[in-house]
Image (cartoon, rainbow, N blue to C red):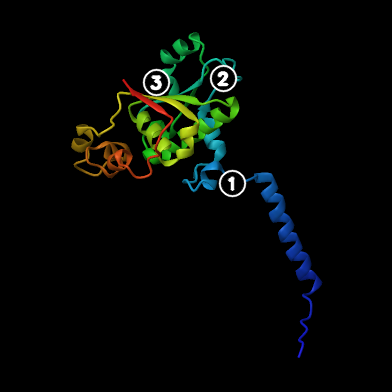
């Protein structure tokens, strides 16, 4: 026996159509998912507007003969304090477009949260120039650049050279001494034998082969 269901009330149909229309409009405005999400990489939890505000680049990129340079500062500092009076003028005089990122809270928070700013900065510079980016980090900033390229492996295709200056690559004893008692995230993460140091130096999810060259000073 055939059973016929009554159609839903007109009001319900209108509401369903409206919800579908809103979903369609929002999807069109926002566009596709980010590269990180589409590739199965960690999503960026920091709002895009906050990440944009922390990135400092020239109004236009005018040196196509050189890759742009992203400067990443260390703990308890800012882009301008770390790089503004030395490296940035020298690189600009040498014909490079230079960008810098201000890590949140003077890089005194969780290094993994700070890394989102570096990931976003590399993506933005690469999209603006169509070329790979050279990344220069100092102290804690070297860990952010390494963490970024390791856990967001699409950056391997966007970064050419990575330069690490005074990097606590294998941890520092100061972190162990300072963190005898509970302490802030950075010194705990920099401690020799910490889970963070083990993760950044471990083989898990390390892309290979890597087109990115790394040098240490």
**Dot 2: element:** loop
CA separation in Å, label 2 and label 3: 18 Å
Q: Residue at x 21, y 36 (%)?
A: 178
Pointer 1 or 2: first along the chain: 1
Vertical order, 144 against 41 (above or below):
above
CA separation in Å, label 1 and label 3: 34 Å
Decide if residue 78 is in sight here: no
Q: Nearer the viewer, mark 2 or mark 3?
A: 2
Q: Quadrant of residue 143?
A: top left
Decide if residue 40 is in sight here: yes
Residue 216 located left or right of residue 87:
left
Q: Quadrant of the C terminus?
A: top left
Q: Indicate which disc residue 33 carries.
A: 1
- Asked if the residue under mark 3 is in contact with the one under mark 2, i.e. CB atoms within 8 Å, the reply is no
Residue that lies at the very extreme toward the front in this rendered image: 209
**Dot 3: element:** helix
Q: Residue at x 40, y 32 (%)?
A: 145
CA separation in Å, label 1 and label 2: 27 Å
Rendering coords of residue 19 (x, y %) = 71, 60
- Residue named by callout 3: 82
Rendering coords of residue 139 (x, y %) = 33, 27
């Amino acid at each position: 026996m055939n059973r016929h269901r009554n159609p839903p009330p007109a009001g319900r149909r209108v509401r369903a159509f409206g919800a579908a229309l809103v979903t369609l409009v929002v999807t069109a405005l926002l566009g596709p998912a980010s590269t990180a999400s589409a590739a199965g990489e960690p999503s960026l939890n920091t709002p895009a507007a906050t990440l944009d505000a922390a990135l400092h680049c020239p109004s236009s990129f005018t040196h196509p003969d050189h890759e742009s340079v992203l400067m990443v500062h260390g703990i308890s500092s800012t882009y301008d304090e770390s790089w503004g009076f030395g490296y940035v003028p020298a690189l600009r005089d040498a014909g490079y477009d230079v960008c810098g990122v201000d890590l949140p809270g003077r890089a005194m928070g969780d290094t993994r949260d700070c890394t989102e700013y570096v990931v976003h900065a590399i993506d933005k510079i690469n999209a603006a120039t169509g070329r790979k980016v050279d990344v220069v980090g100092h102290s804690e900033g070297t860990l952010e650049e390494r963490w970024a390229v390791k856990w967001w492996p699409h950056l391997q295709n966007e970064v050419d050279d990575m330069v690490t200056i005074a990097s606590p690559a294998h941890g520092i004893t100061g972190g162990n001494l300072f963190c005898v008692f509970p302490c802030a995230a950075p010194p705990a993460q920099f401690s020799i034998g910490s889970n963070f140091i083990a993760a950044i130096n471990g083989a898990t999810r390390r892309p290979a082969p890597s087109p990115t060259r790394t040098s240490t000073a």
